[in-house]
């Protein structure tokens, strides 16, 4: 099998290279100072590649300055231009960025002669050694594909295969592909279909994995870990982005936790143990993820970082089994008799270390975990994981974009407020999207949507219909709640 690798500056994606962790700025790219500051924070947090919104020629120019200033500061991180629609912008960006992401659905929507424009674009990429991402999203497929296959994983796969064949016709192979969706079932199915199709075709282009519009906090991390983990477990995926509606710097440790979990072989060891529990007849295998016992000595295990590490690893382990219906449930609160006690957790560090070497290591890991995290928190985690794997819905389903240079308002704050006000509305799908350009398409099958329109105005959607336009920002959450409660 020809497993291709793609070079983005000095970084190799695909082939036999380790998983690359990347993120995206949410600054306005023309705000050069803010964008550079965010890039520096991202590099310090360990990102290996950074994407910036490049919707117009002004942003391409800003990207050039950002690149020069980062170089002057000794930072040579590969930069990716996020273009979406306009081939002229894509062509200009290909002369500046190390990689250009286009969304083929949007590209085809704007250009009747998309194939001709795409050929021109690839020629410029070749001349400049610029890599390309064909970044397709569920919800923004081209009209022709939707008419033929519907807005389905099959349609997503078919669309990508068409664009890959155009790449091959133009003898261009420096291409990474993504097929993101917010729904983990749709997302994993689309990637698997594509992986199989590429395998049959004899050429595996590298895959960029991500669950789009995953939201924030525990739910965003869990959903991302389930979707990405299900594919990495099967050896599918070469670079990942954990999209969070938070400061994008937070995406990086989450991405590395997922990548390390699979690269280090930890997944295989734990999975063997879970499968052994299933073979012994357990219908609810237990969560045996421990926060690395070293953490207990060096770091506060009650910290948010320790919790994030736990939920991401446990989601990577159990999420795929739930998603693929290999198990129906799991037990996040194993059979411990003692109550949780924060105050004593680190007193037991030495005891745990030696116990890890005993034959009863597995059981001791459970004990350690229970001492660290409260039962309530573990139950909430379990509910979030069941929902992320789409097995049991106990909360509203939130679809929130991570925000980018197109975002028109304080997305993070608004999303948190929408979540607070709608937390009781189990069964509803509520979208909060940063911009009117991509937001409506990408909120897919949400029941209601809050979409930034620009100029401090918001459009409220009911299904795919904009029911209130130009609502002033300070009244928009109330308007959304009113529309929901009147329905
Ligand atoms: S919906 Fe708009 S604001 Fe949100 S990430 Fe996508 S392009 Fe950016």
Image (cartoon, rainbow, N blue to C red):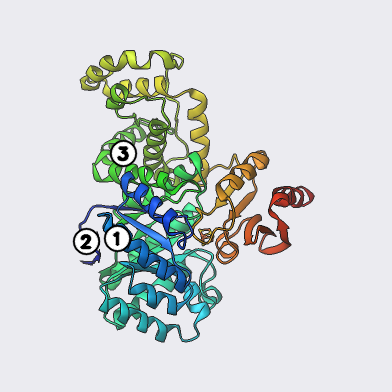
Between the C-alphas of marks 2 and 1, the distance is 8 Å
Mark nearer the N terminus (3 vs 2):
2
Marker count (numbered): 3
Front residue of this view, candidates 5 and 70: 70
Q: Is mark 3 within 8 Å of ligand 1?
A: no
Q: Position of residue 160 (x, y in %)?
A: 40, 71
Q: Is mark 1 within 8 Å of ligand 1?
A: no
Q: Quadrant of the N terminus?
A: bottom left
Q: Position of residue 375 (x, y in %)?
A: 49, 23
Q: Position of residue 21 (x, y in %)?
A: 32, 51
Residue annotated with mark 2: 10
Q: In which image quadrant can residue 318 be found?
A: top left
Front residue of this view, candidates 50 and 237: 50
- Binning the other alpha carbons within 10 Å of mark 3 as few (below 14), some (14 to 19) or many (20 upward) gives some
Circles 2, 1 touching at the beta carbon (< 8 Å): yes
Q: Position of residue 320 (x, y in %)?
A: 40, 46
Please report the residue visible at 60 percent of the width from the left and 41 percent of the height from the top. 395
Dot label at residue 275: none
Please report the residue visible at 57 percent of the width from the left and 57 percent of the height from the top. 434
Residue annotated with mark 1: 78
Front residue of this view, candidates 218 and 189: 218
Residue annotated with mark 3: 271
Judged by depth in the image, the label closer to the viewer, 3 or 2, is 2
């Amino acid at each position: 099998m020809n497993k291709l690798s793609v070079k983005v500056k000095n970084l190799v994606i695909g082939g036999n290279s380790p998983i690359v962790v990347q993120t995206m700025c949410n600054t306005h790219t023309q705000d050069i100072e803010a964008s550079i500051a965010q890039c520096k924070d991202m590099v310090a947090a360990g990102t290996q590649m950074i994407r910036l919104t490049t919707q117009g020629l002004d942003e391409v120019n800003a990207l050039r300055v950002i690149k020069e200033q980062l170089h002057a500061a000794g930072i040579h991180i590969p930069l990716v231009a996020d273009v979406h629609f306009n081939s002229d912008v894509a062509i200009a960006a290909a002369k500046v960025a190390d990689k250009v992401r286009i969304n083929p659905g949007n590209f085809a929507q704007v250009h009747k002669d998309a194939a001709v424009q795409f050929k021109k674009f690839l020629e410029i990429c070749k001349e400049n050694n610029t890599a390309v991402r064909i970044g397709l999203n569920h919800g923004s497929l081209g009209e022709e594909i939707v008419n033929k296959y519907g807005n389905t994983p099959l349609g997503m796969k078919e669309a990508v295969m068409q664009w890959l064949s155009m790449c091959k016709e133009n003898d261009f192979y420096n291409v990474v592909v993504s097929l993101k969706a917010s729904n983990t079932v749709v997302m994993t199915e689309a990637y698997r279909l594509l992986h199989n199709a590429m395998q049959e075709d004899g050429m595996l282009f590298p895959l960029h994995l991500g669950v789009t519009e995953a939201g924030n906090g525990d739910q965003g991390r869990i959903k991302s870990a389930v979707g990405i983990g299900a594919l990495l477990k099967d050896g599918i995926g070469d670079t990942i982005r954990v999209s969070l509606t938070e400061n994008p710097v937070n995406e990086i440790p989450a991405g590395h936790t997922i990548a390390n979990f699979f690269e280090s072989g930890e997944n295989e060891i734990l999975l063997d143990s879970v499968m052994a529990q299933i073979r012994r007849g357990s219908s609810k295998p237990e969560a045996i993820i421990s926060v690395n016992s070293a953490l207990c000595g060096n770091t506060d295990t009650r910290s948010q970082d320790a919790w994030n590490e736990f939920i991401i690893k446990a989601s990577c382990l159990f999420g795929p089994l739930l998603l693929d219906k290999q198990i129906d449930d799991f037990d996040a609160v194993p059979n411990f008799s003692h109550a949780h006690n924060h105050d004593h957790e680190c007193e037991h560090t030495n005891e745990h270390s030696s116990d890890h070497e005993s034959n009863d290591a597995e059981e001791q890991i459970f004990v350690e975990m229970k001492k660290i995290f409260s039962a309530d928190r573990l139950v909430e985690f379990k509910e979030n994981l069941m929902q992320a794997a789409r097995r049991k819905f106990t909360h509203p389903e939130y679809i929130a974009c991570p925000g980018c240079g197109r975002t028109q308002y304080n997305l993070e704050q608004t999303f948190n407020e929408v979540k607070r006000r709608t937390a009781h509305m189990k069964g509803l799908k509520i979208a909060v999207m940063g911009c009117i350009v991509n937001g409506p398409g990408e909120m897919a099958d949400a029941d209601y949507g809050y979409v930034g329109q620009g100029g401090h105005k918001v459009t409220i959607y009911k299904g795919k219909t904009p029911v209130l336009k130009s609502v002033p920002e300070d009244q928009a959450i109330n308007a959304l709640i009113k529309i929901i409660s009147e329905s």
